[in-house]
Amino acid sequence: MPCTGRSSHERATVRPSHGALARTRAIRAYMIVISCVTIRSEILQRLATTSGNGIEDAALSLLALRNSGADPHALLGTQHRSGAWSALPNIEPPSAFHTALALLAIRPFQTTAVRRAAGRAFEWLEEMRGLESHWLWHWKFRLFDRQVRFDPLKSGWPWVPDTVSWVAPTALSIVAFRAWHRDSRRSAPAISMLLDRACIKGGWNAGNSVVFGVDLDPHPDFTAMALLALRNESPGYVVLLRRSLDYLGARLEGSSSPYSLAWAVMALSAHGHQGVNHLKSRLEQSAGAKLDKLPHRTLALVALASEDAPYTFEESSR
């Protein structure tokens, strides 16, 4: 019998020492880092040598490659005369979401041409507003149309002109103004709009939280965008933000969507949420399993979220 004096069953159930556990965790963490770096390098190579479709692909790719010799002039060339960008190059209608995304993409490149393009884009965003901001729509939603629940006095940005405000274009427009350190009279009511339209249990749907008396479920992508817009907001909303962050982490616990996971990682990182590392590992596993099938915008988002410190759209300019 061995000198330990333990039976074979007891020896089989001996737990590893704290030192062994620590070494195992360190090896595991190191392997995750190596895998993540390898995947990110492959993604950047692919983004640098192939083209996507549309402004979302172009803008996110430019951001992902901002430290790898990327050139913003191709994106600048797709800007409308109005100052806006649309979903597809030089094709109407102009879009607040794509204009805000383009502004975020060109911000790290502080050339004269970039600053001129940004000035025109912000002028367009200042004038672009949801239809509910008009007094006739105030009257309509307050007195007659009670099928949706929101305050029409709190409005943000629509996707395209002559429509009502939606979460995604409003959130990214707020982020764009803040990232460029530009004041806007539109920011305060837009922030109020996001807070007003949060879902009952936390998080955000595409537009409203209640329709025809039914509470809508939050959507991970829109929740992440709204949380990026609401970072550093009033402590009075800390409960809503914490509830939304916790929802996002729990909702994507078993997700295999790199697009949603990437947005979530950036949002959780912006708020310093403890769930970010778990979702970042989940993102690496999910993206690595289907790298060849991912569209450009998703590849770019994965690259941004996989940076040592996940990108949050507010790094300092060059």
Image: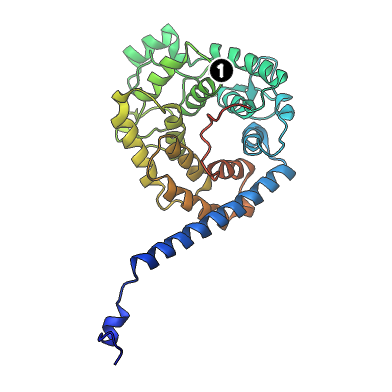
Which quadrant holds the C terminus?
top right
Point out residue 31 in the picture as x, y percentages from the top left corner: 52, 60
Question: Residue, x 31% and y 33% (percent of image)?
Answer: 215
Front-lying residue, 58 or 71: 71
Seen as rendered, the residue at the extreme bottom is 1
Q: Amino acid at mark 1?
A: Pro
Asked if residue 46 lies left or right of residue 237, the reply is right
Mark 1 lies on a secondary structure that is loop
In the picture shown, does residue 260 fall above or below 228?
below
Point out residue 6 in the picture as x, y percentages from the top left corner: 25, 85
In the picture shown, does residue 237 fall above or below 65?
above
Point out residue 247 in the picture as x, y percentages from the top left corner: 35, 41
Question: Residue, x 72% and y 43% (percent of image)?
Answer: 48
Asked if residue 143 lies left or right of residue 58, the reply is left
Question: To which quarter of the image does residue 53 belong?
Answer: top right
Asked if residue 283 lies left or right of residue 235, the reply is right
Name the residue that disc number 1 marks. 161
